[in-house]
Image (cartoon, rainbow, N blue to C red):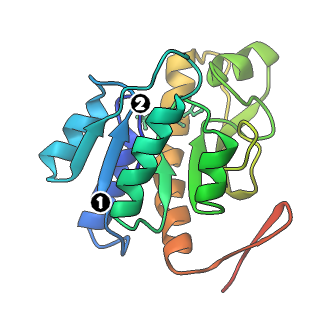
Amino acid sequence: MLASGRGSNLQALMDSVEAGRLDAEIVAVLSDVEQAVALGRARSAGIEARFIEPGPSRSRLSGQAEAAMIAILDRLRVDLVALAGFMRILSPGFVSHFKLRILNIHPSLLPCFPGLHVQKQALDYGVKYSGCTVHFVDEGTDTGPIIIQAAVPVLEEDTEETLSERILVEEHRIYTEAVRLFAEGKLKVEGRRVRVLR
Ligand code: GAR
């Protein structure tokens, strides 16, 4: 998994594996942020956790950083790369190396509000519902084929924090579900549409 921050989605997936709700193994957590809480969570669980020096850009990884990540992920023969609060855009080369094997969770009902400060974008726009999306990663930013979405109401008294919390509960639920469907080979991508095989 790739994570940049507090790692609550990582924790949710680790808990799902531990509880037997998800038949998968999390083999490594890589981060572009040395102090990321996500790395500590992984280490506490005995999972390989590595900081990868991201390079000079704030939005992307250097070629060297991506090559280092690819080397680790290939060595571990990962089936899936799950982004959990990973805040950098991956290059087309990285995306094609793991074609249709990278998932991302995003805290809005895409294609509304891609990018950063997502809950603020939703509040500023005045939408009455927001939510979260798990999607395959393609070359664009938050544009890949959608696997699962969950909606939550936006309340009049909401702040960025309260809306984020309400969305996060749903994130944790649908990320486990999406990874489970992937692991069971039940996702069939047809152009932009993802069919869930029953
Ligand atoms: C989550 O809300 C996730 O959807 C969002 O960052 C948060 C990470 O929380 N991701 C993005 O905005 C990606 N563009 P976490 O570190 O506790 O999982």
Residue that appears at 30% across and 65% down: 17
Residue of label 1: 27
In terms of sequence position, does the residue under pointer 2 or pointer 1 come before the other?
Answer: 2
On the rendered structure, is 138 left or right of 94?
right
Residue that appears at 55% across and 73% down: 181
The residue lying toward the viewer, choosing from 139 and 148, is 139
For the C terminus, the quadrant is: bottom right
Give how far across and how far down residue 58 sits, in percent. Answer: 54, 16
Q: Is mark 2 within 8 Å of ligand 1?
A: yes
- Residue projecting furthest to the right: 191
Q: Amino acid at mark 2?
A: Ser
The residue lying toward the viewer, choosing from 5 and 153, is 5
Please identify the quarter of the rendering in which residue 119 is found.
Answer: top right
User: Can residue 134 be seen by looking at this rendering?
Assistant: no
> Marks 2 and 1, how far apart in space?
17 Å
The residue lying toward the viewer, choosing from 30 and 146, is 30
Please identify the quarter of the rendering in which residue 140 is found.
Answer: top right
Give how far across and how far down residue 79 sits, in percent. Answer: 47, 68
